[in-house]
Image: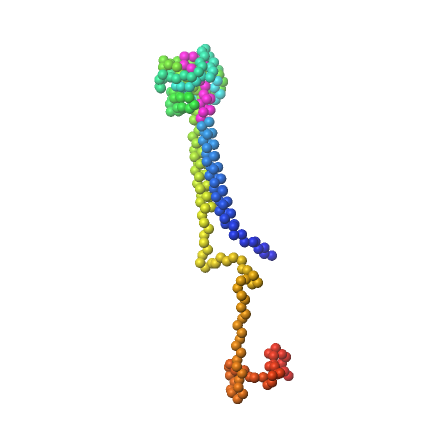
Amino acid sequence: MVTLQPHRPDAPARRRTGLVVAGVVTLVAGVLGALGLWLLAEQRYDDGVEALARAPVGCETVVSIESTGELLVYAELSGRFDDTAGNCSAQGTFRAESDAPTVNVDVTGPDGSRLAVEAASGSDYDRGGFRGVQVGTMEAAESGDHVVQVTSDDGVFALAIGNDPREGVFALRAAALAVLAAGVVVGLSLVTLGRRPEAAPSGSESVQGPVAPWWESDQAVSAPPERPIAPPRIPGQPSGPGWRDEPAGRDEQPPSPWGPPSA
């Protein structure tokens, strides 16, 4: 059994509207997703800077280092001290007198061993009021409290130790740009498809609506043309096409072509 579906002329319009709506939703989702990833990258950067362990110049400070392996050492030229533990206290903001101070660092691990600090550069930061330049690296064999002694003749600043605060930031920013590009391309493509007009039918095809029944038609129904009646043949004249023989009498009817055959 074949099931016939009713014709819906508004189906193409609904489909185009759906494409436009899907395109707008995709575009907005791409923008919001990219914005969220970008803000997450910025927050990760700020948290990385805040997590650095700081020791002021001229003090022997106890700092808690939770990470192991290679750590970066920064000369923090501007920032603030929240709290320090050691033979001197430091509070409030600070700013160095030189952009390239000379620093002498002595780090003692939790087990009493001295950690070597190797000179290095290339990883600087400037976030949230903190500005630091890398001056070295060190290997931390275990986590815990480390004693850091910093000396310098270039004024007041801090030594900051920890992981690279930029770690993972560039990957999140790249992901944000990729999400934005994908949302814009896909969203605009869907909107363009939805706003494209329907193709006109070809010349060999004709689009017709439903045909009205004959009793509802405004046109008059014409009867089929009648067959012309041939004139009677005059007695004595030869018979031929277009002539008919007159019946023998008025009451006599010509034999029916559908009657039974004669014996």
Q: Measured along the vertical axis of the image, is residue 21 above or below residue 223?
A: above
The answer to whether 117 appears left or right of 19 in the picture is: left
The C terminus lies in which quarter of the figure? Answer: bottom right
Q: Position of residue 163 (x, y in %)?
A: 44, 23
Residue 166, image quadrant: top left
Residue 54 magenta-drawn?
Answer: yes
Q: Position of residue 114 (x, y in %)?
A: 44, 15
Q: Is residue 245 visible?
A: yes
Q: Residue at x 44, y 26 (%)?
A: 45
What's the coloring here?
rainbow
Q: Measured along the vertical axis of the image, is residue 62 above or below residue 252?
A: above
Q: Nearer the viewer, residue 219 or 56?
A: 219
Q: Position of residue 183 (x, y in %)?
A: 46, 38
The N terminus lies in which quarter of the figure? Answer: bottom right
- Extreme residue in the top direction: 87
Instruction: Point out the stretch of residues depicted in magenta.
Output: 44-61
Q: Is residue 109 visible?
A: no
Q: Residue at x 54, y 54 (%)?
A: 7
Q: Measured along the vertical axis of the image, is residue 139 above or below residue 256?
A: above
Q: How many marks?
A: 0
The answer to whether 11 appears left or right of 181 in the picture is: right
Residue 229 magenta-drawn?
Answer: no
- Extreme residue in the bottom direction: 236
Residue 127, image quadrant: top left
Q: Residue at x 52, y 50 (%)?
A: 10
Q: Position of residue 15 (x, y in %)?
A: 50, 47
Q: Nearer the viewer, residue 16 or 162?
A: 16
Q: Residue at x 45, y 12 (%)?
A: 89
